[in-house]
Image (cartoon, rainbow, N blue to C red):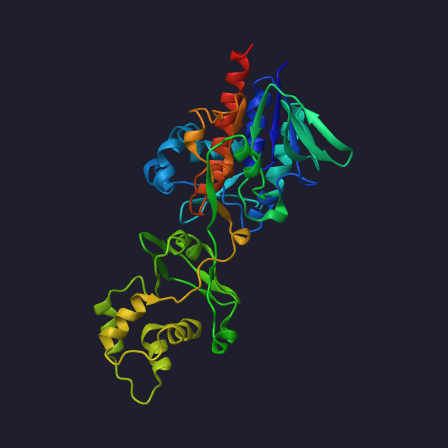
Amino acid sequence: MKHAVVIGAGPAGLMAAEVMAQAGMRVTICEGKPSVGRKFLMAGKSGLNLTKDEPFVPFMESFAEARSPLTPMIESFNAEAVQDWARGLQQEVFTGSTGRVFPKAMKASPLLRAWMGRLGDLGVNVNTRWLWQGWNGTALAYETPAGEQTLTPDVTVLAMGGASWSRLGATGKWADVLAQKGVALAPFAGSNAGVQVPWSDHMTKHLGTPLKGVAWQAGPYHSRGEATLSAQGLEGGGIYSVSRGVREGHDLFLDLLPDMTVPEVTTKLQAPRGKASLSNHLRKTLRLTPAQIALVQEMARPLPDRLRATARLLKALPIKNAGLRPMDEAISTAGGIKFAAMDAGLMLRDLPGVFAAGEMLDWEAPTGGYLISACLATGRWAGQHAVEWAASAE
């Protein structure tokens, strides 16, 4: 029986392990943390967005320049297949109004328990607190509670994540090991990250307030979604989706009234103001919230005298910021193993029999189901090709 080792117990690694075990391989998962799926469980705290139910072409456009290499992988395990897989674990799913797909339980723990049960039934062995150190000759070397341990499998699947949320296990330290082996890597950068804003004191009472029904833009990246005014700046799905634009140096703009045109906003503002303050006038005519009005004043005081200029400002409010929050706080990271360093089956060209999957690869995608869906698809792809390679090496 061929032996496969999977390093990393996130969704990509677990999917690779499942595929290889179903093919009859003896599979060992080695995870550096005390338990499996830690970042997966963290993602589940906000509902576990497994995938997005939308046509394949727009789905793939969300992966930008990584769309081409990822297409065959996601095509073979698309959004519908992800849902069927979850149902196969007795986890019913539902599709929200925006097409995002969630387990009905709205958390990750029931799915993860069922998944680990399936892997256990398939004979998969799980070693926790096994921290990978690289290779000792041809053997995989680990630091464990019992001292240094080594394994010499027939195939290896690397699935150790990117370089954010290091406390959950994704430290990115594996990059140094692979770089020493000559593997081509792209530098890490924060993706789906919050934006730092140095607020003045007058914003203090509004911190923690969500901005709803708004739209964001940073260069070519657009998003219709809410964000929260946090003590550090802006957080939330709406801002995460355009964070790449901020990272690339584009100015950030907020459209407070995305369902109205500039002429329509101007007409609303032409209503008699009387003795009302500007803040009250904005609140009454446009139904802006106190937090939205405070943000306008924070970013653009003094406001223009001409109504049309004010309308244009409300439709494209420049958000002064200090860039993204630290990379370790980002939901995911760009960078990692370049696709050119791997063959079509995700095997490292310089390391025969070693495959990679998930966030270790140089791709990024917005939140909304794309991240987990691609991790599952690349894990499955790597596992399938590891099985084929092991068979051909007999």
Residue with the most extreme top position? 394
Q: Indicate the position of residue 237 as horizontal and vertical percent values.
A: 45, 54
Res. 31 image quadrant: top right
Q: Indicate the position of residue 147 as horizontal and vertical percent values.
A: 77, 33
Tell me if 153 is positioned left or right of 184 in this view.
right
Q: Residue at x 35, y 74 (%)?
A: 300
Residue with the most extreme bottom position? 275
Query: Toward the viewer: 185 or 145?
Result: 185
Q: Exactly how many numbered labels are in the figure?
A: 0
Query: Toward the viewer: 357 or 124?
Result: 357
Tell me if 33 is positioned left or right of 92 in this view.
right
Residue 106 visible here: no
Q: Residue at x 71, y 37 (%)?
A: 129
Residue 292 visible here: yes
Please state, as top left, top right, bottom left or bottom right, where the N terminus lies in the image: top right
Query: Toward the viewer: 338 or 2?
Result: 338
Residue 42 in the image: above or below residue 270:
above
Q: Indicate the position of residue 351 as horizontal and vertical percent values.
A: 52, 24
Q: Residue at x 60, y 47 (%)?
A: 166
Res. 251 image quadrant: bottom left
Q: Residue at x 58, y 32 (%)?
A: 14
Tell me if 74 is positioned left or right of 132 in this view.
left
Please state, as top left, top right, bottom left or bottom right, where the C terminus lies in the image: top right
Q: Indicate the position of residue 104 as horizontal and vertical percent values.
A: 54, 44
Tell me if 352 is positioned left or right of 291 in this view.
right
Residue 333 in the image: above or below residue 205:
above
